[in-house]
Image: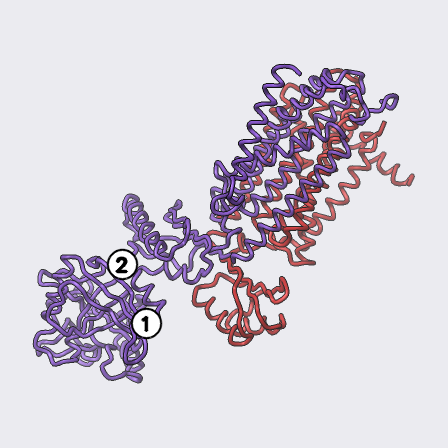
Chain colours: A red, B purple
Amino acid sequence: MTDIVGKRARFFLISGIIITVSIVALANFGLKPGIEFSSGSMMTIHFEQVIDSDELKQEVASSGYPNAIIQQTREGDFLIRTGELTSEGKAQITNALTAQFGPATESEFHSVSPMVAAETARNAAIAIGVAAVGILLYITWAFRRMPKPFRYGVCALIALGHDVLIALGIFSILSVTLGWEINLMFITGILAVVGYSVNNTVVVFDRIRENLNRGVSPNFDVVVNNSLVETLGRSLNTSLTTLFVVLALLLFVGASIQNFAVVLLIGIIAGTFSSICIAPNLLVTWEKREWRKLFRPARVSQSSQ
Amino acid sequence: MIKRDRATLIMISIMFALALLVVFPIGKGILGQKGIRLGLDLVGGSHLVYQAQFSEDATSEEKARNIDRALETIQHRIDKYGVTEPIIQSQEGGRILVQLPGFTDIDEAKRLVEQTGFLEFREVELNEEGEPVYLTSYLDEGRTDFFNGEEEGSRIFVDNNGDPAVFLVKDEQGTLLYIDKEGNPLTTGEARQIVAGILEELAPFSPALSSWIPARGDDGTQLTGSFLDEAMPYAAAGITGTETGVNISWNEEGGIIFDQIAQHLYGGAFYLSPKQELGIFLDDTLISHPWIKQPAYGGTGVITGQFTPDEVTRLAILLESGSLPMPLEKPPLYQQKISATLGADFIDMSIMAGLIGIILVMLFMGIYYRLPGGLAILALTFYVVLVLAIFKLIPVTMTLAGIGGFVLSIGMAVDANILIFERLKEELRLGRTLGAAVESGFSRAWPAIRDSNITTFIICGILYILGSRIVESAPVMGFAITLAIGVAISMFTAIVVTRTFLRILAGTRWAQKTPLFTIYSGKGK
């Protein structure tokens, strides 16, 4: 039988490395907040004429917006991001651009005031906090008949923190390399990942609960390993079907829900890993109180490789 | 086949047929006006949120009443533009939300909403000798009181474009104050500078720098837009090209006041004297200053001026819909405009994504789980139709994020099936008959299905509340609603539909063929 629990030190090590990389990336690169969170205006303008991004930047700068960020999104489509624009300011830019580059159409415009941005950011942060506490309480409640129900909640929470951290870390790398921004869809995606990750973990925990009640084995690690192996098929299959639809979303809908789909993609992969390899193994480690011993075998296995 | 299962099967079939009929009504489309309601990001349009400005001593009751009036006024203005299903709502904290599906000229939308549209009529102030007064008269004589002592209202002096340049008011102590158009007090020196600028380009007959005072009827009531009954734009061929203007008709009281004003303006002045001019001011801007050419008009009039056809239309709408009871903060708190073509692209792309996703999931289920997988495909088909029918009946407004939630829920919808099938396989491996395996498989899989889906519901609840507390609520709430409905229906289809199918199957000869359940004799663990 596949031994997952026995290899827990190795799994912790893998996760530890990925999380360290994520934290380092987050600390160094940070995340780029979109205008929903940082306020400002963003417009997508389509030009009939072929124009150069640098020339465009210059023209926008000379009409009074030197800090504008210009990005080419498609052939002939440019995204111009500035601070919050007044009607006059907007007219000034568009007039200057049509004068310089010929006919242009504005396909999208989005503007958020500082007040609304602050509100949105605050509420998003609260939502993530409430989600974490809610999940902890719910799992503690769902496993209330087990000895030490709180542990299940904490382990599920650590697993989902693991998934969210990895998603954030990858996004901070994407923000420096591709200029991706954090928007509301990203937050929605993160919360969906939270739900998904816990969903998977609960299925595994549920089987542990059942096997403990049936008294499969007096050894906790054997019970956990049996439960993991028994739910492995389900865990992988559900992840696969979800991956299919998320990939379809990413490939066919593309740009406007790209953030959302990529967060889900990362979250599903990380969530599957953490619900199989991290959360249950944390339970075993906690049960055995082997926190200090844990990485001694890990070091041994490292040197033996 | 047990009786109960047959009854359930019939019920499921009826439900499916009904749902199908809801989703594909005969002769109508699936999406759009008569179909599932589409959000702004899919049809294109403008989305604005404004902050209303109230004076500090306004009571919450007054605020609520004024917001209601503002909503009506905005509704009225927008109705004239023929926008289908606009959403005009008040939000917490004195905010006004305006959503215009299909109306993508956001700048025009803003102009339409933001115009406070206070229309008033003014005439030129006269001194004791009956001669017109100008801003220069006040400055040159260093006046400490109005020339026309009877009129205590503000004086407006406009520049060559008709825009307000200087206001002259009397404060509570009775001192005259010069104020610029931003509302800042001016010294006489600063006022002189403004005058010098205007004088440089002053044209003959210009209304610039004239002292405009409120035009009042005999009982002292000022003539304002509130006495207007109807305003109709017109365009007619004239000597200098197309002449445009607005025909106005007064209500009964307005007609009387207007004639009284016409009487005293017309009386005893030379033709084309400033004394005969009636200034029409919209939000302190002089938009037209026709000469009063007869002593009585009998309730109608015409506003003419240098207008483009668009401006005439907008002016007529503004005149008729009246003024907003309070100004709105500019720029709006939130603005979003999405072009219609972009929205249409999204619809096509997301239908494509949904279809591909469903097909992939179905293929996987069929190949991996064989016969039960085939049942799951049926259940999934039922699921998709039922969810779409529910979206349409509630109705749920579909946004891009909502479609994301729906597509995601397809992937998660089979989860309950997978949980059940995995259990089923375990039970079959233990040598149980299909009938027994179905029952114990279901009862064993249930706690996991329940507990794991509750976490999704918790997240959906949190997202919904988050959505309701932020301005950009549509994507977040849309996702939460579609995902929650999707997960709920997926539990229902797995527990009722898949189970019934499996039970019925258990009574047939197919039940003996274990390879169809991916169980091979002798290969159990």
Residue A192, x across and y down, in percent: 61, 40
Residue that badge 1 annotates? B307
Would you identify the image quadrant in which residue B524 lies?
Answer: top right
Q: Is residue B340 left or right of residue B203?
A: right
Please name whichever residue, B339 or B453, is drawn nearer the observer in this view of the structure: B339
Q: Name which residue type carries label 1.
A: Phe
Q: How crowded is mark 1: few (under 14 residues within 10 Å), some or many (20 or more)?
A: some
Quadrant of the frame with the C terminus of chain A: top right
Q: Residue at x 59, y 73 (%)?
A: A49
Label 2 chain ID: B
Callouts 2 and 1 on one subunit: yes
> Is B505 drawn above or below residue B223 in the view shown?
above
Quadrant of the frame with the N terminus of chain A: top right
Residue B326, x across and y down, in percent: 30, 55
Residue B271, x across and y down, in percent: 14, 80
Name the secondary structure under disc 2: helix
Q: Which residue lies furthest to the right in this view?
A: A304
Q: Which mark is residue B320?
A: 2
